[in-house]
Amino acid sequence: MSYTVTAVSDPRRLRDFLMLPFDIYRRDPNWVAPVVSEMRRTLDPKRNPYFATASLQLFVCYKGKTPVSRLALVINRSHEKKFGVRAAFFGFFEARPDTSAVSALFGTAEKYCRDQGAEIIEGPFNPNHYSEIGLELDGFETPPSFFQPHNPSYYRDFLELAGFRLSYRFQTMRNDDIRGTILRRFGGRPEPAAVDGYRVRSLDTQDLARELERIREVNNDAFAGNWHFLPLSRDEYLFSAKYMCLVTRPDLVKIVEHNGEPVAVLHCVLDINPLLRRLRGRVGPLKYLRFLRDRKRIRTLIIYTVGIKGPHQHTRVHQLLLQAFYRMARGFDVLEATWVSPDNIPALRAAEGLELKPDKHFGIFEKRLD
């Protein structure tokens, strides 16, 4: 039976693109189905401000009339301007265990990228550097935590057969008894206090729009030199933070100010994946109420981001953030940290102090087109 790769250009093809994972993972008890309406919002260039400076093309490969693999391709002009390379970023890659389907899919994808002048293909990015990124390399037998991708083990083989190589590797870290660690090692530490003009406080939900802008400004400064980082516009950050209050609480977001100016942010979230798994990709009023009820029982905390503006990175800010974190984390059983790079020595030292151990590993793959 022949394979046909089609660019998504109508509602039926888009539905095939969105629903393919539900078929691939139907027997995988660890898979967490994405909320379909949110995927539609994310992949709609008219609604997602990220695509103001980036192009998006979705592809579906059919075996006869049956969808068997899919891929999204993004070319970001801002990335080319900052890093000097015209890269195409792939994401939302899914495929049945069918090498011919993947070969046809990437053959079409590479032709598209070359036609767009791309020099390299990198991914997975779903769809950008501040979304879910990477391919899961191990730990397939355990469920993913919030913001972690999950995929079959054979996906790496497919990428390598298509000519991709592992170019960047990172890990998540985990402590299954963070309360015990905090009480044993830091139980006698003082509560956070104002020192040297610095003070720490929680997120103010009564002024949420301004708070989000403060967080955006801190993170854009703090992560400016990070791998592949592009500063987020105000519209991009508001778009990505639309459901932030469903995955965190005000006391889990700490802002450090220096003489009234925000200079650092510690952003932790709840592992809501066990609740998302029950939704099975669909949200309704009753499911939403159950989600809000059960969220109160979540015992796993995730360190999402820690950002400190450059001029304040070697000051008392670290002490204030740690003290605030100790107080926060002792109310949970499990602690996880996302996206720790093996060459980020300060992050690894901080993780060691919290007795975090490597958990799962993820990779970014690339292929040169020249």
Image (cartoon, rainbow, N blue to C red):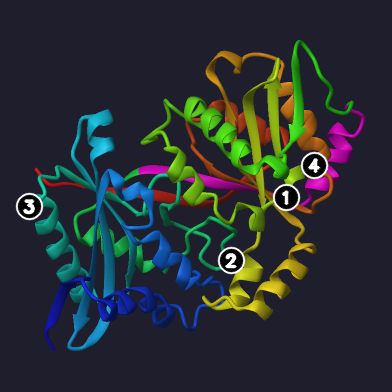
Q: Which mark is residue 249?
A: 1
Query: First in sequence: mark 4 or mark 1?
Result: 1
Q: How far apart are marks 1 and 2 (CA)?
A: 26 Å
Secondary element under disc 3, as helix, strand or loop, is: helix
Q: What stretch is highlighted in magenta?
A: 168-189
Label 2 neighbour load within 10 Å: few <14, some 14-19, many 20+ = few
Q: How far apart are marks 4 and 3 (CA)?
A: 51 Å
What residue is pinned by disc 4?
328
Query: First in sequence: mark 3 or mark 2?
Result: 3
Q: Is 188 contained in the magenta span?
A: yes
Q: Is 338 contained in the magenta span?
A: no
Please name whichever residue, 338 or 169, is drawn nearer the observer in this view of the structure.
338
Secondary element under disc 4, as helix, strand or loop, is: helix
What residue is shown at x 61% (from left), y 16% (from top)? 312
What residue is pinned by disc 2?
142
Label 1 neighbour load within 10 Å: few <14, some 14-19, many 20+ = some
What residue is shown at x 53% (from left), y 18% (from top)? 310
Secondary element under disc 1, as helix, strand or loop, is: loop
Could you say where residue 186 lies in the image, as x and y percent from the top left? 85, 32
Please name whichever residue, 281 or 10, is drawn nearer the observer in this view of the structure.
10
Which quadrant of the structure image shows residue 11?
A: bottom left
The amino acid type found where label 1 is placed reads: Arg
Which quadrant of the structure image shows residue 107?
A: bottom left
In front: label 4 or label 1 = 1
Q: Distance between the residues labelled 4 and 2?
A: 26 Å
What residue is pinned by disc 3?
115
Q: How far apart are marks 3 and 2 (CA)?
A: 40 Å
